[in-house]
Image: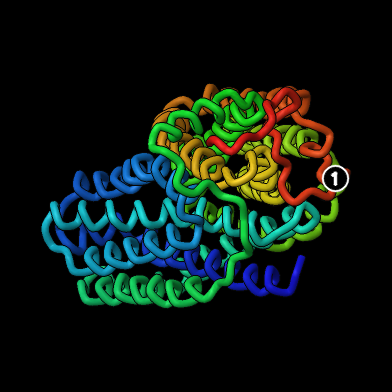
Amino acid sequence: MTRAMGAAMRRIHVGNALSAFGLGFTVPYLYVYVAQVRGLGAMTAGLVLAVFAVAALIVLPFAGRAIVRRGPRPVLLAALVTAAVGALSLGLAGRPTAVLLSAAALGAGQAVMQPALATMIVDCSTADTRSRAFAMQFFLQNLGLGVGGLIGGHLVDATRVDSFTLLFSIEAAMFLVLVGVMASVRMPRAPRIEGAPAASAKGSWKQLLGNRAMVQLSVLGFVLFFACYGQFESGLSAYGVEAAGISTSALGTALAANTLMIVVAQFAVLKFVERRRRSRVIAGVGLIWAVAWVAAGYAGLGHGSREMATAAFVSTYALFGLGEAMLSPTVAPLVADLAPSGMAGQYNSVFALVKQLALAVGPAVGGPMGASLPAPYVVTFLVFSLGITFLAVRLGRQLTAVQDQPWLGRSRVVARGGASAEPVTAEA
């Protein structure tokens, strides 16, 4: 990595941390703000949360193409400005329509930030440094979320509208500061498609869908996010409270254990996974999460003491955190290495879209099951975790040796999408 790439990467990591800080700063308090502080009711508050997901699903397919055509930095700057406008408007909005439109702008901006930042990491890293760069990204994202939520919680007062207006105004100002930081990033020259005809958008999707390894990774990614991230704040918490009798304070401890595991284990785990096959690492995560679901089953379905149930439930979240730490330097670099030259933005956006779909479906399925069908809930997601292992082993058969074991090659980005991928052409 050159000195210029290193300087750019430091600014990109600042961007990752601040964007995560903004998410943790306001999102946990959106429901209270809309339903209680603004007095718009539970239905409007629920619609606001749904709008976040829908806005992401709408903009992400276009974001990938924009990143390929214009580069990740201009797209990121546009997303930051959109998010800043959305945040400021949300803090001032008092009517349902204004709240929903503001939430759509904020959700769309925040959704586009992630694939744009991920593509910037790809452009500013090499095959040797990419895993560590994405591990650092994940570490800073979790740190930013935790610190943002902590500070935001001390600023808000449910009896004062102006405290929330201040909260959203600070978030908007932070996004504008981040515009200045990211505008100063000097990106290395990366191959990207300039002036491609409009019809080539269909060609790029056809090429992506023809990439068997990427399709399999997308299916695997959906199961990963559905079985873990999609359950954190819905199904698993409902299961813990209803079936396991976990107190709200213990639930907070479990969430803290998850974050602590990631922060403590991230770089120790990185040394472990760097020289191992990516497909085997992902398969190992499936087994670790299967153990996590067994622990959750003991917490809610066993006959031990309340203390043992709480300890088992907290360990479930900690084991999830260990798996997340293993995935962060594995999955995102693999998406980049599957992308043909100049197409990393589109591949990152597609994978982000898969994540958003899983995060939308996961709570809808897991929430009701966790609360009312505890035994089927645990068994279902235990099977999903074992499915991760199966899908990862199957994916390994589609990867080239360098894609599965990146230390074998020295190329910056593997330009083939799988063992049987077609040679890369200028058309996308």
The residue where tag 1 is placed is 409
Quarter-wise, where is residue 62 in the image?
top left
Q: 281 or 346, which is in the foreground?
A: 346
173 left or right of 246? left
Q: Residues within 10 Å of mark 1 (few under 14, many from 20)?
A: some
Q: Which quarter of the figure is the N terminus placed in?
A: bottom right
**Residue at coordinates 79% horizontally, 54% vertically from top-left?**
270
Res 386 visible: no
> Which residue is the extreme one toward the left?
95
User: Could you tell me the amino acid type at mark 1?
Assistant: Gly
In the displayed structure, 417 sits above or below 127; it is above
Q: Position of residue 176 (x, y in %)?
A: 38, 74
Q: Nearer the viewer, residue 99 or 370?
A: 99
Query: Residue, x 50% and y 69% (percent of image)?
Result: 18
User: Is residue 210 shown left or right of residue 167?
Assistant: right
| Residue at left offset 64%, top offset 44% | 341
